[in-house]
Amino acid sequence: MSPAILVLEDGRTFHGESYGAEGETFGEAVFSTGMTGYQETLTDPSYHRQVVVMTAPHVGNTGMNDEDPESRKIWVSGYVVRDPARVPSSWRARRSLDDALREQGVVGISGIDTRALTRHLRERGAMRVGISTTETDPQTLLARVLDADEMAGTELSDQVTTTETYVVPAVGEKRFTVAAVDLGIKANTPRMMAERGIEVHVMPATVSAEEVLAVDPDGVFYSNGPGDPAATTQQVELLQALLRQGLPYFGICFGNQLFGRALGFGTYKLKYGHRGINQPVIDRTTGKVEVTAHNHGFAVDAPLDGSTRTQYGDASVSHVCLNDDVVEGLELRDEAGKLKAFSVQYHPEAAAGPHDAAYLFDRFCDLMGDNA
């Protein structure tokens, strides 16, 4: 193992050892509090252009397998762990995490005080960072960190989306057809829909309203994805056109933020975001509290109380994070109070768990059934 350094944009420096590929990388430093599911995290396209700091000290114990990836590759820009497992101990493992990172050119660092780094990001906020195994001077690396792009104002969905439409067939009897706009979709999302009898047409982020309507969908879905929702306009205009058509809508994560913007709400960048699998959220429509998986650095700026009249119906906040009152879900109803569309900021499709929010896919089926 060779020496490595990590330098934050405010100059804070950590010295450790190389983990994964040799070289240099830049991105936005964020931390994830999940104690399991690192393979799903690494392959989640929402982490594109981010350097993920794991707060759990031991990472890599179960290696990497061929069944659990959420997409075609590892998307994180860099990876930071304290005590990596050098030898995996799962019968499902096909390679070590270190080998997978090296094979895909992902630069990482290990052996640093991730608790101190996490506390620093909590106090100062998510910020740009650089990791290098080739540069020994922190000030020289800092200069390159300050030249790197910031996450705010960046549109990234076109970099992670599918290039062509593909279909995930329904399992068993087909009940519905859904047009899913891929903004960085995870594999478990169409899988969970298919299990409910939905034929899912996964479409590129650049799809037009005419192309969506051509598959005669019973509903429209917007996936999770990376980037600043305020920098995204095409998908907002597409969603507005589809809402005018009266199509039922369900959005997750980035799909929640774009739904908010389509309804006329603003979005803003959180100080350090929500990332992990232990976030408590209350579903105001049922009063139930769910433990949920999160990965978002932006949020919708909508009033927590009452409803807002829009040209598509009455919009209101349906889910709220109990840690900090961040908006975690929206719903749209007509004048009679009938549900027309909804979205959540967190991840009901989280393959590594928890699974408290899987009912939202059933709610989507109910919505499409009521609209038939």
Image (tube, rainbow, N blue to C red):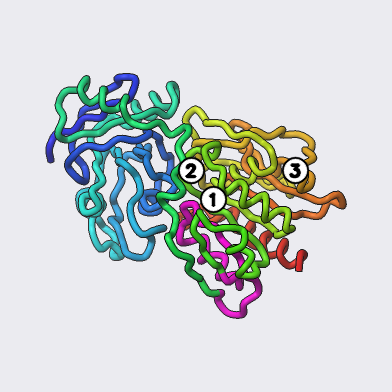
**Judging from the image, what secondary structure is the residue with disc 3 in?**
strand
Q: Which of the two discs, 1 and 3, sits closer to the camera?
A: 3
The circle on residue 87 is none
Image marks 2 and 1: residues in contact by CB distance under 8 Å: yes
- Eyeballing the image, is 127 above or below 256? above
The quarter of the picture where residue 116 lies is top left
The quarter of the rendered structure image containing the C terminus is bottom right
Task: State the CA–CA distance, disc 2 to disc 3.
Answer: 24 Å
* Direction from residue 232 to residue 362 in the image, left or right: right
Residue 57 position, x and y percent, is 32, 39
Q: Secondary structure at mark 2?
A: strand
Number of other residues with Cα within 10 Å of mark 2, as a class: few under 14, some 14 to 19, many 20 or more: many
- Residue stretch rendered in magenta on the structure: 170-199
Quarter of the image containing the N terminus? top left
Q: For this rendering, which residue is in front, 148 or 356?
A: 148
Q: Nearer the viewer, residue 363 or 128?
A: 128
Residue 206, x across and y down, in percent: 51, 54
Of the residues under marks 1 and 3, which one precedes in the sequence? 3
Bin the neighbour count of mark 1 within 10 Å (Cα to Cα): few under 14, some 14-19, many 20 and up: many
Question: Does residue 211 appear in the picture of this structure?
Answer: yes
In the image as oriented, which residue stretches furthest toward the bottom?
A: 173
**Which residue is labeled 3 in the image?**
315
For marks 2 and 1, the one nearer the N-term is 2
Q: Residue at x 59, y 44 (%)?
A: 258
Residue 209, image x and y in percent?
Answer: 61, 58
Which percent across, then down, holds residue 5? 21, 30
Q: Which residue is mark 1?
A: 347
Amino acid at the residue labelled 2: Asn
What amino acid does circle 3 point to? Ala
Circle 2 residue: 295
* Residue 189 is one of the magenta-drawn residues: yes
Give the distance between the C-alpha atoms of the residues marked 1 and 3, in whole angstroms: 21 Å
